[in-house]
Amino acid sequence: MSNSRLFRRISIGSAAVWLTLFALAPNLLVLSASFLTRDEAQLIAPLLTLDNYKAILDPLFMRVLAKSLYLAAGATLICLVAGYPFAYTLARMKTRFKPLLLMLVMIPFWTNSLLRTYALIFLLKAKGLISLCLLWLGIIDKPVSFMYTETAVFIGMTYTLLPFMILPLYSSVEKLDLRLLEAAGDLGASKFKIFRHITLPLTMPGIIAGCMMVFLPALGMFYIPDLLGGGKNLLVGNFIKNQFLVSRNWPMGAAASIVLTLLMLVLVWAYHSSAKRLGKKTEGTAL
Amino acid sequence: MKRTLLIVFALACAVFAAGAARAGSGVVYVYNWTEYIPEGVIEQFSEETGIKVVYATYESNEAMYAKLKMLGNKGFDVIVPSSYFVSKMAREGMLHEIDKSKLPNFKNLDAAYLDQPFDKDNKYSVPYTWGGTGILANPGKLGTMPTKWADLWKPEYNGVLLVQDDLREVFGMALKAKGYSLNDTDPKHIEEAYKYLKKLMPSIRTFNSDSPKVPFMNEEVDAGMIWNGEAYVAMGEVPALNFVWPEEGGILWMDCMAIPAGAKNLDEAHAFINFILRPDIAKKMVEEWGYATPNKAAMALLDDDMRTSRVIFPDKATMAKSEFQDDIGDAIVIYEKYWNLLKGEQ
């Protein structure tokens, strides 16, 4: 009895200490820094101000934010369109190779994503594999480069983040009650109707979870646009990094981080509340 | 998240370093750029002097500066800041004075590289290696060879340019092309450079400061600004490439060895610096990186190919027109504002 209580105390206590030290404290430091003033020699001067947030509301930062949101939303949409049929087919497959196929989705994760981005360069460049194949097939007559374009950025982001979309979708399709689909078919519903009224609503939690898991990391990702897109755009990640390292404006960088964190919190909150509502709704229909 | 890790790591280093320093000397803590010391040099130093080297690396001056600030200038005995960070750090009291009586090899250095504006009389710094940014181009594909920075604004270069992803370098190029100093702090001149750079944006195919030679070697770009050491390597791989020091002058930098104000192992730090100044060690550094050495005695040991390379060692006339990057103080905020505008408006 007392042994298990001790264990509980230690495990909860260590988790609490860990989170306080490495999540709560740093975030509070960032939060407090965002209200202070830049100092050339000491990095931060203890003068309270709201100027950092005023500067953040500048149209330039809004443009930077909009560009980041656009790239993240685009990558999410492509991942969804590519990932849904994939996850659906995989989950409904009647084969003993299913675990192996699922494994193949995850294997690229074993390699660092930066390295995989460099590997993409070898496919996309003018003297790269794709260009050489097209040349060999006679489809093009001089080398074509896909590098340093927005297309390359979307290819890179989709490639890196696709598994995050497939896995939640897979688990929600797998949980799908096949009897519902059969019943609908027996009652004369067309394939499209079945998909629209049964499959889609029941897999919605997976869709939302997948979109969140792609969108949030995509928002902060700046090395892919830098490497594949040629770094021609300023994204939120670049902006924050520049504030901290280049202009050594820590308070401003902290304010931008806080704005980004708040934006993400709103999205997570929206996800939770919509998941709750959906949960209630599906429970209601099941009853 | 990265920042958090950095702080935690920095604290861990501080605790560790403080503990180790108390244990006695015979150790030197060296904090240098990534891939910036030839293989075997550290081992050779330890073997010959019996001093153990604890070696850590950084990727940018800014990262090194931030870490030392947070550690209160303690934890390391030798650092290698670039010219413009030497002046900044010295002004902020972050550096220890160099005791030249402990550096018998200081005499090997070429006087041309000493007593520079960023550190008069080399009170705080000893040159490690130096280089500069010029123009690399593929005249065969372009049908022309640029000779000055302003050439890059010509329509022939539309969509084929590489520029560095570094605001001091890019604004330095524009300021030079406009006839100003690359260390200019006048907001009007910086704005003029910004307007001029805006016209260049459509010509730029990629920004790259990680390894600018790679897009050249992949034939993704045909012209652009590049460090001379990178250019030297790229020209070895692709003979069609040609490097030129622009008529307006190059953007020079010098990385210097310095001792942080809170260093504990002063004798060992001087011994390490003195070792790097040995001609045979300095020679290895040129051969490995293709960057110039400030070491006169090492020059005599170099191959003719390297010693006479105008890529590695610009001639006197070029040197006279070129400038070393210096600290620009608070003006960096103005540069950064225009840099954000330049990239954010795309």
Image (cartoon, coloured by chain):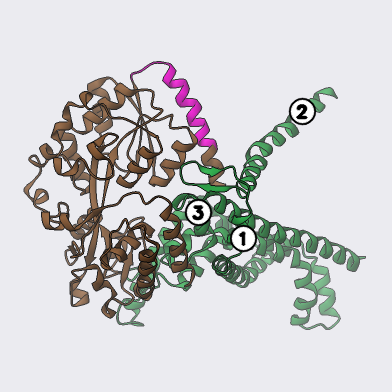
Circle 1 sits in a helix, a strand or a loop, which is it?
helix
Chain A is which colour? green
Q: Is residue A275 left or right of residue B177?
A: right
Callout 1 environment at 10 Å: few (<14), some (14 to 19), or many (20+)? few
Q: Is residue A100 left or right of residue A170?
A: left
Decide whether residue A163 is among the magenta residues. no
The circle drawn on residue A7 is: 2
Q: Could you say which is closer to the camera, residue A244 or residue A101? A: A244
Which residue is pictured at 38% across the width and 66% down the height? B188
* Cα separation between marks 3 and 1: 15 Å
- Image mark 1: chain: A
Q: Could you say which is closer to the camera, residue A272 or residue B247? A: B247
Name the residue carrying label 3: A243
Residue type at mark 2? Phe
Q: Residue A257's image quarter?
A: bottom right
Front of the two marks 3 and 1: 1
Q: Position of residue A172 (x, y in %)?
A: 73, 62
Decide whether residue B23 is among the magenta residues. yes
Q: Mark 1 and mark 2 in contact? Answer it, CB < 8 Å.
A: no
* Cα separation between marks 1 and 2: 49 Å
Circle 2 sits in a helix, a strand or a loop, which is it?
helix
Residue type at mark 1? Lys
Of all chains in the rendering, the one displayed in brown is B
Query: As displayed, is residue A188 above or below residue A175?
Result: below
Residue located farthest toward the right when viewing the structure as drawn? A287
| Whether residue B34 is visible | no
Residue type at mark 3? Gln
Name the residue carrying label 1: A54
